Image (tube, grey):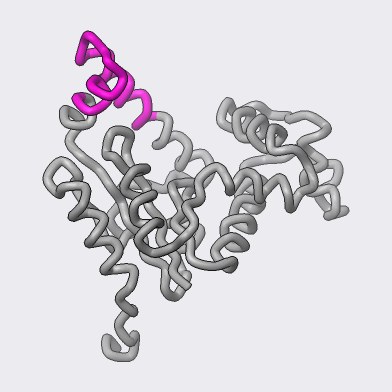
Amino acid sequence: MTVVTISRELGSRGTRIAEAVGHELDATCIDKEVLAEMARQAGVQVEVIVEAEEKLMSRAGVVSQEMRSLFSADPNRRNRPMDQATYVDGMTKAIRALAERGSVVFIGRGSQLILENHPTALHVHLYAAPAIRAGRIQRRRGMAEIGTAERIIGLADEQRRNWYQRFFTSADWKNCRHYHLMLDTGRIPEATAVALIVHAARTAPPDREEHT
């Protein structure tokens, strides 16, 4: 069973690379499926999870009664508004459950932090220089001005940074300590990046006793 987590900057071609890695490893790519699993475990519609995340990101103090029912099976939480700790607890349980169901490639969702201590998971970060990423976004979306693409890149970086800080106690998602492999897709061709990740994922971790 293979587990890979891939975090990526907007414009780094991370989703395409993750899907190609999944194909090569015969693994399921998981992104928004995490939200669906959270909803399944909580017995609510996935839209409730999405709304909860949006409310928490806006730092709302109280969420709806339906959201509170997410963890209603726990009498200690039944009457409490959902906070980020409760949300992360649900996300953690969902990602860990999905990681046990077979070979998977997680795309984002803080999976590299949640599965930090997974014995065989490979954690990957894909990035590129802002100018390269903006150029890719401009071409992909047919934008007339590169400045528009640059603003989109900047906003996406800020949103992702805020998401990690909100749900993972100010974690720096670009810190190399969270990853086994970091690839600059502005320098490393897409096919090469896929091959490197696949090779690393198929390689067993060294015996920890060798390093003691």
**Viewport quadrant of the C terminus:** bottom left
- Image x and y of residue 12, in percent: 27, 39
| Along the viewing direction, whichever of 103 and 95 lies nearer the viewer | 103
| Along the viewing direction, whichever of 191 and 135 lies nearer the viewer | 191
- Farthest residue, direction top: 144
Left or right: where does residue 33 sit relative to residue 62?
A: left
- Image x and y of residue 9, in percent: 32, 38
Residue sitting at x 54%, y 67%: 102
Tell me where the magenta segment starts and ends, as one range.
Answer: 135-158
Left or right: where does residue 166 sit relative to residue 177?
A: right
Residue sitting at x 26%, y 68%: 199
In the depicted structure, whether residue 99 falls above or below residue 61: below
Residue sitting at x 30%, y 83%: 206
User: How many numbered marks have been drawn onto this rendered protein structure?
Assistant: 0
Magenta stretch, main secondary structure class: helix
Q: Is residue 168 magenta?
A: no
- Image quarter of residue 137: top left
Residue sitting at x 17%, y 31%: 132
- Image x and y of residue 193, in percent: 22, 54
Left or right: where does residue 134 sit relative to residue 202?
A: left
Q: Is residue 148 magenta?
A: yes
- Image x and y of residue 211, in percent: 27, 86
Left or right: where does residue 53 sit relative to residue 205?
A: right
| Along the viewing direction, whichever of 30 and 6 lies nearer the viewer | 30
- Farthest residue, direction left: 187
